[in-house]
């Protein structure tokens, strides 16, 4: 069972990563750099529990803030770029961050270690060992999955509320046409930066959770591939509503696990599925129209409330 | 250090070819194709594998690369950019899927994903003026890159077909009004972009005497870097950016070592992107991007 | 129903069907996994990269294990409580990704109830998996997993330090390199300028430089004449090679892996950089070094754990068996390490006197762990004797191979010394 708990935790982490992409996706900005904020969150979170003796909750929150700070650092100057130049800027940042994480060394010596294992904290390309908070505090995989999913729930509810607010409509307007948005007096840059920083915060939290689940991290964990996949969760699940990233990340984390018996062919199948979804449901698995219809169906079945207009 | 810079210049020819392929795909065809590098890698890989298996001469690799690469690129273009056309983001996701499938198929090919040897007829030929090492193969490739760049510039700006391709990629309905067959132009442009990519991939592989699976992603990242530096408007800028990258990488390795070398490069890109809108408001190396 | 509504209806139905299918598949696997131990087999788990970029390392290691299990089972299995019991090897594919590694490690430990978990190849995946283990045995406050695990590679120095349940059969890297340097100095020395090249983004490469080569040089009071870095995926090495050449390197330490090694050596050939001695490390002695590197890699010396050039007849048998199953003529040493590793585990199981009943699993695992920790003078199929050290690394006599005439030839053995 703990295998599935681990998968559940990983799924939750991927859902968070998908939402971090989605936050700026709502305003039409495509980031392939979320892995950088994920990595920053992982290193900050792990450093606090391993070296600083902090508790998990504070470490995870700090990871989130570190991710947000990093995203502001890259977002403020580059978000005024149009179209995919912003996307490329995020790629450059992610690659730069990976180089930094690869070369990072701080912490303190471990007197009791074996040969080659005498450092506590990140040790350059050798990596960051001994992130053993979960074992040290007897947190079981099941409990950890619950913690992860509680955070996911908070994020989902937050997006649910945002989606029904004026903010979402403004972001969608920016996505549709920036000029229109500006002409009706929307401070476009401020909204884009805020959305991107929220994405950075969520990615940072996700990274801190990842580090504690994995117990060992190194720069190699944070390659650009991971954020392309995170983007794929959103695009495939559907980028029109907040349900898309959730469904996309769940399906694409759990499906490869259930496909294990076909072994080496499962990556092909996974890739093929991406192509097929894009061919036949380009708006993603969950489209805005679908959610609207379900909303209507649910409320009319309940009969009590009149159908509310979806944003 | 000067030595290094001069050698980097020659190495830049390899990057220039790669950059031209990306320029055609991203700049002219306006496609965000994440599978571009992987398609090139797959073609060269299969070419090398077949030539190795059949014992053909070295030119066979280039021929087979083109034979595999061009139809494969057309297939990718059809799947990701013709069948999926609503939104550039969806097409991009589709190319991601194609990338995954191709890379995994190579692992399951008879080559088992292991490096494949490619004969370099100019392997140990270098020219040593004043203590400089100028590789003959690099010079040949640099010449080739400049020739391709010149031909492409002429083709895209002077010839009717070239103009038709650009119009067609910019706006299919305008093209239709002018009596240009959008579909045919797109196929033609894809073939050219793919041929340039295949030649670039083969050049790299030959210069290092082999091809490996990492090449696909590596080429995509390097291609994007060149694109960011050179923009999508001018072939001359692309070639300059590519050669600049060649020089910068060499000098970087010499001065700061490989560990942080890439950091400087990416930092420069970020700075360039961040500063540019202030320097030349309204006009960038990318033109109107939306 | 309008057309769009209808098509939406179909997709909803398709998604619903897919969910049901996925759920039932899941159910099938979780229930399938409950028939263990008491069905009369010993369960061992194997976690290796069998797809994705690590396949060329994982597949040979896995095949070595399979050949060993087939051989044991063909003899009827292992004797437990006076009865022969067969071994069942459950194979999982981690794609060289640490997130999959931790999930699979839990699966093997808790769902499959494996007696021993073997794997995996990539050090960074192994490190994540072993981070789940209890650090010190008998620590009541540490609720980490308590299952013996042994990797038959994961070369990176210090990996087993994370838990007393973690073992490794890869060879003592610092000792290997110390010996290689010493022997080369005795035969070809003295050397003036020692230089090193490291893959800056590769954990094992960097760790080998820090934990093995640097101390070896420090013991000799030598400062490297030149130290260069490159990336695993670099394609141009001219700057680095020129630096090494300028430093008049005559003893070149190539702490890097095959792909970069080949590129660097081709460049060395081009620049006419020919140091008197080149040594490289374990895992780099792959067929590609010769196939792709051709003339340029001639003369490189590697320490090796098990090589197909070993004289022991059983090694030849294993190479033939590997060839029969894969049609490959070159047997990477991972095959031998996988085969030997399973045999070590078998020895520990026999000595542990386990009961192999569901209720004795925890006890059995502990017994096997203790036996693994106590391995002493074990006679390997490759003809050498193996011992477990205090760091839970198998200490093995070191052999050297040298690329000669386009092939790996056995170059030095502990009993015969230099062979040519």
Image (cartoon, coloured by chain):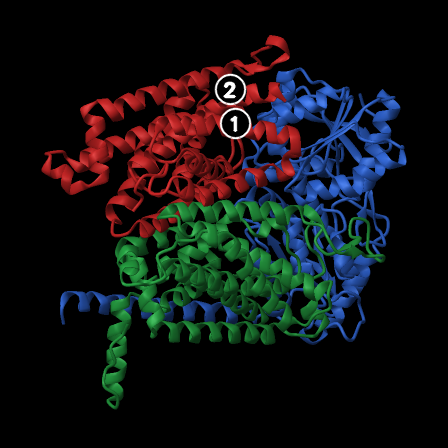
Chain colours: A green, B red, C blue
**Mark 2 element type:** helix
- Per the rendering, the mark at residue B10 is 2
| Residue at point 47%, 42% (across, down) | B108
Question: Can you see residue C76?
Answer: no
Q: Upstream in the sequence, badge 2 or badge 1?
A: 2
Q: Chain of mark 2?
A: B
Crowding near the residue tagged with mark 1, few <14, some 14–19, many ≥20 C-alpha atoms within 10 Å? many
**Mark 1 element type:** helix
The x, y position of residue A152, in whole percent, is 49, 72
Report, in whole angstroms, how far the alpha carbon at label 2 lies from the one at label 1.
Answer: 8 Å
| Residue at point 20%, 26% (across, down) | B161
The x, y position of residue C113, in whole percent, is 64, 68
Crowding near the residue tagged with mark 2, few <14, some 14–19, many ≥20 C-alpha atoms within 10 Å? many
Asked if the residue at tag 1 contacts the one at tag 2, i.e. Cβ–Cβ closer than 8 Å, the answer is: yes
Question: Can you see residue C365?
Answer: yes
**Would residue B108 be found to the left or right of residue C392 on screen?**
left
Compared to residue B75, the image places residue B247 above or below, namely above
Residue matched to label 1? B246
């Amino acid at each position: 069972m703990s295998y599935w708990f681990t998968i559940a935790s990983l799924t939750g982490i991927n859902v968070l990563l998908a939402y971090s992409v989605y936050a700026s996706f709502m305003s039409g900005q495509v980031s392939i750099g979320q892995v950088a904020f994920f990595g920053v969150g992982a290193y900050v979170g792990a450093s606090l529990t391993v070296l600083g003796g902090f508790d998990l909750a504070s470490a995870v929150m700090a990871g989130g803030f570190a991710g947000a700070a990093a995203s502001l650092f890259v977002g403020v100057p580059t978000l005024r770029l149009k179209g995919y130049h912003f996307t490329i800027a995020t790629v450059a940042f992610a690659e730069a961050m990976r180089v930094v994480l690869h070369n990072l060394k701080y912490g303190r010596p471990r007197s009791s270690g074996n040969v080659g294992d005498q450092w506590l904290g990140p040790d350059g390309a050798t990596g960051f060992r001994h992130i053993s908070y979960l074992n040290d505090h007897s947190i079981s995989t099941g409990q950890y999955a619950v913690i992860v999913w509680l955070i996911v729930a908070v994020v989902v509810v937050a997006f649910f509320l945002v989606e029904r607010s004026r903010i979402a409509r403004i972001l969608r307007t920016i996505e549709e046409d920036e000029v229109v948005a500006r002409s009706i007096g929307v401070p476009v840059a401020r909204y884009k930066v805020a959305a991107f920083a929220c994405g950075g915060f969520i990615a940072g939290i996700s990274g801190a959770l990842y580090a504690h689940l994995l117990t060992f991290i190194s720069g190699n964990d944070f390659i650009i591939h991971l954020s392309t996949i995170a983007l794929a969760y959103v695009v495939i699940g559907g980028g029109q509503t907040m349900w898309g990233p959730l469904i996309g990340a769940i399906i694409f984390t759990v499906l490869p696990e259930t496909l294990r018996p076909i072994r080496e062919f499962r990556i092909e199948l996974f890739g093929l599925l991406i192509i097929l979804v894009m061919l036949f449901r380009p708006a993603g698995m969950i489209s805005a129209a679908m959610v609207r219809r379900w909303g209507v169906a649910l409320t009319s079945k309940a009969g009590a409330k009149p159908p509310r207009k979806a944003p | 250090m000067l030595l290094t810079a001069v050698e980097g210049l020659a190495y830049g020819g390899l990057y220039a070819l790669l950059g031209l392929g990306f320029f055609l795909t991203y700049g002219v065809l306006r496609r965000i194709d994440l599978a571009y590098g992987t398609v090139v890698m797959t073609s060269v890989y299969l070419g090398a594998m077949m030539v190795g298996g059949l014992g053909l001469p070295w030119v066979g690799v280039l021929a087979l690369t083109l034979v595999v690469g061009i139809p494969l690129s057309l297939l990718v273009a059809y799947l990701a950019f013709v069948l999926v056309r609503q939104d550039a983001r969806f097409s991009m996701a589709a190319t991601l899927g194609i990338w995954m499938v191709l890379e995994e198929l190579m692992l399951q090919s008879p080559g088992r994903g292991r490096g494949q040897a490619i004969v370099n007829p100019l392997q140990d030929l270098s020219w040593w003026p004043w203590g400089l090492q100028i590789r003959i193969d690099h010079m040949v490739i640099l010449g080739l890159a400049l020739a391709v760049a010149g031909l492409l510039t002429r083709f895209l700006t002077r010839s009717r077909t070239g103009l038709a391709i650009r119009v067609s990629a910019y706006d299919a309905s305008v093209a239709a009004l002018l009596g240009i067959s959008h579909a045919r132009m797109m196929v033609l442009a894809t073939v050219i972009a793919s041929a340039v990519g295949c030649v670039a991939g083969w050049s790299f592989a030959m210069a290092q005497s082999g091809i490996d699976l990492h090449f696909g992603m590596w080429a995509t990242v390097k291609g994007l870097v060149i694109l960011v530096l050179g923009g999508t408007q001018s072939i001359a800028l692309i070639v300059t950016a590519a050669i600049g990258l060649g020089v910068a990488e060499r000098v970087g390795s010499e001065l700061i070592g490989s560990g942080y070398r890439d950091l400087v490069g990416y930092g420069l890109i970020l700075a360039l992107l961040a500063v540019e809108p202030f320097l030349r408001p309204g006009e960038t190396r990318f033109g109107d991007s939306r | 129903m309008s057309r769009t509504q209808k098509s939406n209806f179909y997709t909803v139905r398709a998604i619903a069907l897919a969910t049901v299918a996925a759920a039932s598949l899941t159910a099938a696997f979780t229930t399938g996994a409950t028939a263990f131990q008491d069905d009369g087999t010993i369960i061992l788990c194997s976690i290796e990269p069998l797809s994705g970029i690590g396949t060329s390392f994982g597949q040979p290691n896995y095949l070595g294990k399979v050949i060993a299990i087939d051989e044991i089972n063909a003899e009827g299995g292992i004797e437990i409580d006076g009865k022969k019991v067969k071994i069942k090897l459950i194979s999982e594919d981690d794609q060289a990704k640490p997130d999959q590694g931790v999930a699979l490690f839990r699966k093997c430990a808790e769902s499959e109830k494996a007696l021993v978990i073997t794997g995996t190849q990539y050090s960074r995946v192994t490190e994540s998996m072993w981070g789940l283990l209890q650090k010190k045995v008998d620590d009541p406050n540490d609720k980490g997993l308590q299952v013996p695990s042994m990797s038959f590679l994961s070369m990176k120095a210090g990996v087993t330090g994370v838990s007393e349940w973690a073992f490794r059969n890869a060879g003592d890297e610092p000792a290997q390199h110390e010996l290689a340097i010493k022997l080369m100095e005795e035969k070809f020395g003295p050397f003036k300028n020692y230089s090193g090249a490291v893959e800056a983004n590769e954990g094992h490469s960097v760790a080998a430089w820090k934990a093995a080569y640097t101390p070896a040089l420090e013991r000799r009071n030598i400062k490297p004449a030149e130290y260069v870095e490159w990336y695993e995926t670099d394609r141009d090495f001219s700057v680095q090679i020129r630096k090494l050449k300028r430093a008049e390197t005559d003893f070149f330490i190539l702490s890097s892996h095959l792909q970069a090694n080949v590129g660097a050596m081709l460049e060395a050939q081009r620049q006419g950089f020919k140091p008197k001695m080149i040594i490289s490390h374990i895992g780099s002695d792959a067929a590609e070094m010769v196939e792709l590197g051709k003339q340029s890699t001639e003369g490189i010396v590697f320490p090796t754990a098990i090589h197909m050039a070993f004289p022991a007849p059983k090694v030849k048998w294993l190479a033939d068996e590997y060839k029969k199953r894969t049609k490959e003529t070159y047997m990477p040493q991972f095959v031998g390490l996988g085969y030997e590793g399973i045999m070590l585990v078998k020895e520990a199981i026999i000595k542990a006197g386990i009961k192999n009943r569901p209720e004795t699993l925890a006890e059995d695992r502990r017994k096997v762990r203790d036996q693994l920790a106590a391995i002493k003078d074990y006679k390997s199929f490759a003809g050498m004797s193996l011992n477990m050290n205090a760091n839970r690394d198998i200490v093995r006599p070191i052999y050297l191979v040298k690329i000669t005439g386009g092939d790996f030839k056995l170059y030095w053995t502990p009993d015969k010394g230099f062979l040519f």
